[in-house]
Amino acid sequence: LQMIRKAGYPTETHIVQTEDGYLLTLHRIPRKNGAPVLLQHALLTTSADFLILGKDKGLAFILANHGYDVWLGNFRGNTHSRAHVSLSPSNSKFWNFSFHEMGIYDVPAMILYITKMTSQPLHAYIGHSIGSTVSYVMATERPEITRMVRIIISLAPAAILKRVTSPLRLISIFLENTQELLQLLGINEILPISSTYSLTKSICNINKEICANGLFFFCGFDREQLNNTLLSTFLSHNPAGTSIKMVLHLHQIVNSGKFCQYDYGRMKNLQIYNTSEPPDYNLANITTPFALFYAENDPISTVPVSITNKSI
């Protein structure tokens, strides 16, 4: 909110309740009679991602400048959406979610709220990375909600991830191998801002090059596109936390090469899905118009993955 006000724009905060009780924060740059658009952030980040570049380059501001009514969502579990009607973040049940729940509960709740508030269909849903993944889940599992959206725009689309080269893959392998131990220790969240802010701030203040290389290591190298001046600002908001189950689900679809629901193991799958294997998300059933944008040096959302999506 401070970034929006500092840039000279009006702003609002809205709290949206999902069907399963999570309380999500929506930030808004209102525009009377403007077509509503919803921006949804990537893994381990927040709505701030669309604001950090400032009023000339930040996507939220660019859209506001062009007359859109801009809504910025925050997924369950991040810095701005750590609340539930009955569960505390200290309760392991709070963290029992992956991108599946975000797709069938979070984004639908936001879209229903926005369309009710504005009395208009959603002009565009713009998802970055996991924000795009979630839109595919919604489009396959909640088509009645997706019909309220005129177009879904994916930035760094992520669905079939078998070609992932990012070191994040190693982190997911570690979490898979230590899952039971982490549960015994009561650790269900990964990389909340409170656990990393002081360290990253200290390192970046000493040497921005170390910070930049750390970012390149995980997200892909592109020095020309890196704004060193804003690096410390970016890291003051990120990583913003998510569930370990989220990372494990991503690890499963990387390993399987399939875009499918969470794999609980044969016995539990039979109980939940009535089949020994988790069901696939049927991307072929998506009828909403999509626009896909990818970068060739993205180690997570690679070109072949994007082409796979685009061919649907």
Image: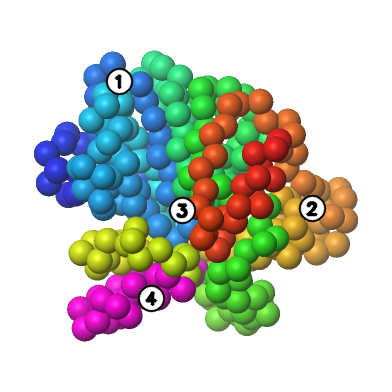
Tag 3 secondary structure: loop
Crowding near pointer 1: few (<14 within 10 Å), some, many (20+)?
some
Q: Is residue 95 left or right of residue 59?
A: right
Q: Earlier in the sequence, mark 4 or mark 1?
A: 1
* Magenta stretch contains residue 213: yes
**Gap between marks 1 and 3, in whole Å?**
25 Å
- The residue labelled by disc 3 is 42
Tag 2 secondary structure: loop
- The residue labelled by disc 2 is 278
Crowding near pointer 4: few (<14 within 10 Å), some, many (20+)?
some
Give me the residue at 79% from left, 47% from top: 279
Give me the residue at 65% from left, 45% from top: 307
Give me the residue at 34% from left, 58% from top: 225
Looking at the picture, which amino acid does disc 4 mark?
Asn
Whether pointer 4 and pointer 3 mark residues with C-beta atoms closer than 8 Å, the reply is: no
Q: Position of residue 135 (x, y in %)?
A: 56, 40
**Gap between marks 2 and 4, in whole Å?**
37 Å
**Gap between marks 4 and 3, in whole Å?**
20 Å
Q: Earlier in the sequence, mark 4 or mark 3?
A: 3
Q: Is residue 161 visible?
A: yes
Tag on residue 213? 4
- Which of these two is toward me, 117 or 171? 171
Q: Position of residue 248 (x, y in %)?
A: 63, 65
Q: Which residues are magenta?
A: 189-217
**Gap between marks 4 and 1, in whole Å?**
40 Å
- Give the quarter of the image for residue 140: top right
- The residue labelled by disc 1 is 34
Q: Is residue 73 above or below residue 183?
A: above
Looking at the picture, which amino acid does disc 2 mark?
Pro
Looking at the picture, which amino acid does disc 1 mark?
Gly
Whether pointer 2 and pointer 4 mark residues with C-beta atoms closer than 8 Å, the reply is: no
